[in-house]
Amino acid sequence: MSYDFDSIIDRRGTNSLKYDFALERGKPEGLLPMWVADMDFSAPPEVLADIQKVVSRGILGYSEAKDDYYAAVADWFGSRFGYHVTRHEIIKTPGIVFALTQAVRALTEPNEAVMIQTPVYYPFFEVVRTNGRKLVTNPLLYADGRYCIDFEDFERNIADYGVKLFILCSPHNPVGRVWTQEELERLNGICVKRGVIIVSDEIHCDFVWSKHPHTCFGRLNENAIIATAPSKTFSLSGLQTSNLFVRNTDLLNRLKTEIGRSGYSQLNTLGLVACRSAYTKGRAWLEELHAYLAENIRITREFLATRIPKIRLVEPEGTYLLWLDFSQYGLTQDELDRRITEGAKLWLSSGTIFGADGKGFQRINIACPKATLVDALGRLEKEFTQ
């Protein structure tokens, strides 16, 4: 490999959310943190070099995007996913959660229903509830170690609650599903028939495994809103840069109006540079990262199967966030969480933060050096084979 993913970068004492805020988040100090979706790898050196050029000038004033920014974004999604978007269909936003919040506010009214599929990325709950909308859940079905969509419940909920907006997670966080085109087409057919607007969070689209191709929802429905970002792909989360793809002119204008009401205007200066640089210069780095993460998944799969078989890996089709099933231990969620933190000295994401149907699960981020991963697996083995 020409890129280094093995070096352990000491992030403690850097105000890192992942490493430095255990006490503030109700955790004991000294845990090995593998919770938040924040990679422990340096961003691509090509991107860092472009950021350094800006920093070296000494002025970090207001910046805006020109044609090369929009071309970089459009070329990435056109070449990788066959989804072709124009400059005027891209809305820049300071993060996916902000974008989802604005979509909820712009496209629904207070007390109208918004549906999500649980267990799911926990801010989905917040963007609905904190904006005074009615939360409707379509729990995923779990059987034989795999999740699928309950389409009958999905359509029934739309009819019963008058759902106006559906927020899709694709690929799905935390269960790791990469939805097939057939599954997405069926969802789309129901939503079109019932007049439901679709917002598809595709932030993890660059991480799909074992021949599970990602289908951009915008290819199925030109009225869908597609939320994307370079942050998870290129280890750039702190620069808060994301992009919405919106082809429907009415939805586009409603979103721009709502974003304007928030007082937001220019993106982070370095975020603009990093996004353009990553999408134009980051392919080789990402290819090597894919290989590294695939090996980390293999290590995890084999370790659990041979040494802690009661912890079942939900086979990941996408993302670098693995969903671990501890249900064979018969523990309450509080007991499980306590053994993870006090026994294994790990900081994972407790399953129930993703919804009540996450009971008995933990999410672990394996985007880290192999030595860190092996350390974490060893801690689990020591605690759960006693």
Image (tube, helix red, strand yellow):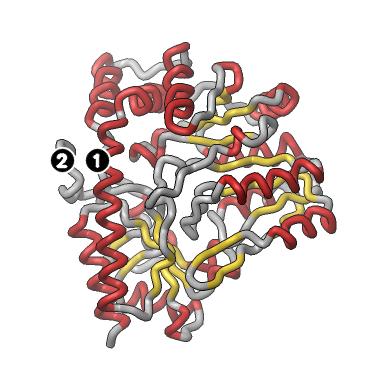
Marks 1 and 2: in contact by CB < 8 Å?
Answer: yes
Q: Is residue 114 above or below residue 356?
A: above
Residue at figure coordinates x 40%, y 33% from the top left? 239
Residue at figure coordinates x 34%, y 59% from the top left? 34
The answer for how far apart the CA atoms under marks 2 and 1 are is 7 Å
Q: Quadrant of the N terminus?
A: top left
Does 282 sit left or right of 204 as displayed? left
Residue kind at label 1, given as amino acid type: Glu
User: Which circle's residue, 2 or 1, is located before the other in the chain?
Assistant: 2
Q: Secondary structure at mark 2?
A: loop
Give the residue number, with chain letter if any, for mark 1: 288
Position of residue 282 measured from the top left corner of the image (x, y, whole percent): 31, 30
Give me the disc on residue 1. 2
Position of residue 332 measured from the top left corner of the image (x, y, whole percent): 50, 82
| Residue 63 seen in this snapshot | yes
Position of residue 279 measured from the top left corner of the image (x, y, whole percent): 38, 26
Position of residue 234 measured from the top left corner of the image (x, y, whole percent): 34, 37
For disc 1, the neighbor class at 10 Å (few under 14, some 14 to 19, many from 20) is some
Q: Secondary structure at mark 1?
A: helix
Residue at figure coordinates x 28%, y 48% from the top left? 40
Does 379 sit left or right of 194 as displayed? left
